[in-house]
Image: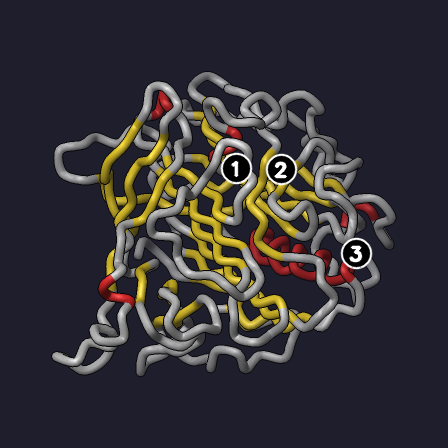
Amino acid sequence: MAGTLTGSIEHYLSSATGVDMARDIFACLVNFFDGHAQMTRIASQAGSSYVGTQSLALPGYTSDGNRSGVNAFGVWRWDKVNGDKVYILVQHSGGATIGTAPGNPGVAQGNYGVAVQYAMDSSGGNPWNGGTANAGADAKNGTNVWVPNGGTLLVWPRPNGPGGTYATGRQYLCAVGYYTPTPARFHIIMDDDQIAMACDMGNNSGYDYLHYFGPYTVRTGLTAGTGAYVCMNLTGMDALTTPWDTDLGVLDGSTAYEGGAVLTTANQVRTIRCASLYDANDTQYSPNPLVPGFDIFDAFVRMHDATSPSQYGFFGKIDPSFLAFVCNANSLSTNSTKTRCVFGSSTKSHAKWLLPWDGATIPGSGLSQTGVQF
């Protein structure tokens, strides 16, 4: 991992309505980003029917006097230690379609809930094309949410890239939480370079949303350009397994698997796939009968994009100290020191993500909407 590991984990949300649930997941993210040393909020929209003071509405949970309304959004600049400036947009729609006014334009898989997207300009300029008063009344640009500002514009996930359905407006987001009024559990884990989110809609230890954004180590023999980041986003109702041979990032955003990566800056964000672990997922091999415990597998990534100029082949791997894969382990199981935690489907045989943990908290034990901070 790079730099300081921080997190906001074990948010237990028992919101009464769909609007409340989306608002409360959104508030988890807003409060974490607002309090992070590398993050600066540059824009905000309180949403329709916000409650209380407009400029104070974004961080509010449903139980607070100031709270956001439908299609609220915020934009943060992430000042990374390598000098890159990555911009993050987070939006929630409650039970309305994401991207309706005042959060228009916007599209996400599933249409409802909470969603995020990332953007950067290769020159370091600010690509945000909307308002910047940051007092709860900012609007997106109705034609182009993001624009180049001195360099090549990069917007994750893939539908915003070359040949994508949203390559002009750049308004497609990754869904990271839903609006179902049922107990949910939400986690955010981050270091100086990368971020992960996990959401369990139903609080049944089956994680319906898994999200990652961060750098990769480029394969020997290749040179990565500016903006060499991977985004992986998996959605579905407690039926997730990492899709080894499924596209992560499709042109129209029509599948449950979103994301994409940049290898060559000029080619922008492209579709990726993960390496195959079919044999490792067999109970005959995992846990490993030759040694105590489970094997931990690096997250190798490969290009799989047909849009001209097409790109295919392995190009690198994600930092295994932050994100790796494990097979045939129960979701929410940890290592002995509680510094790594397993996230994924409640089906044991499904391959799962292995993410950092705080070294103390028992996963699934939190009962507070504000969660545990570290």
Q: Depth-wise, is mark 1 or mark 2 nearer the camera?
A: 1
Q: Is residue 8 visible?
A: no
Q: Is residue 124 above or below residue 350?
A: above
Give the residue type that dot 2 points to.
Ile
Q: As shown in the figure, which amino acid type bears the numbered disc 3?
A: Arg
- Horizontal side, residue 260 vs residue 76: left or right: left
Q: Nearer the viewer, residue 179 or 47?
A: 179
Q: Is residue 239 above or below residue 125?
A: below
Q: Position of residue 296 (x, y in %)?
A: 25, 66
Q: Quadrant of the N terminus?
A: bottom left
Q: Which mark is residue 67?
A: 3
Q: Which residue is mark 1?
A: 87
Helix, strand or loop status at disc 2: strand
Quadrant position of residue 264: top left
Q: Residue at x 31, y 60 (%)?
A: 324
Q: CA distance from mark 2 to mark 3?
A: 19 Å
Is disc 1 in contact with disc 2, using a CB cutoff of under 8 Å? Answer: yes
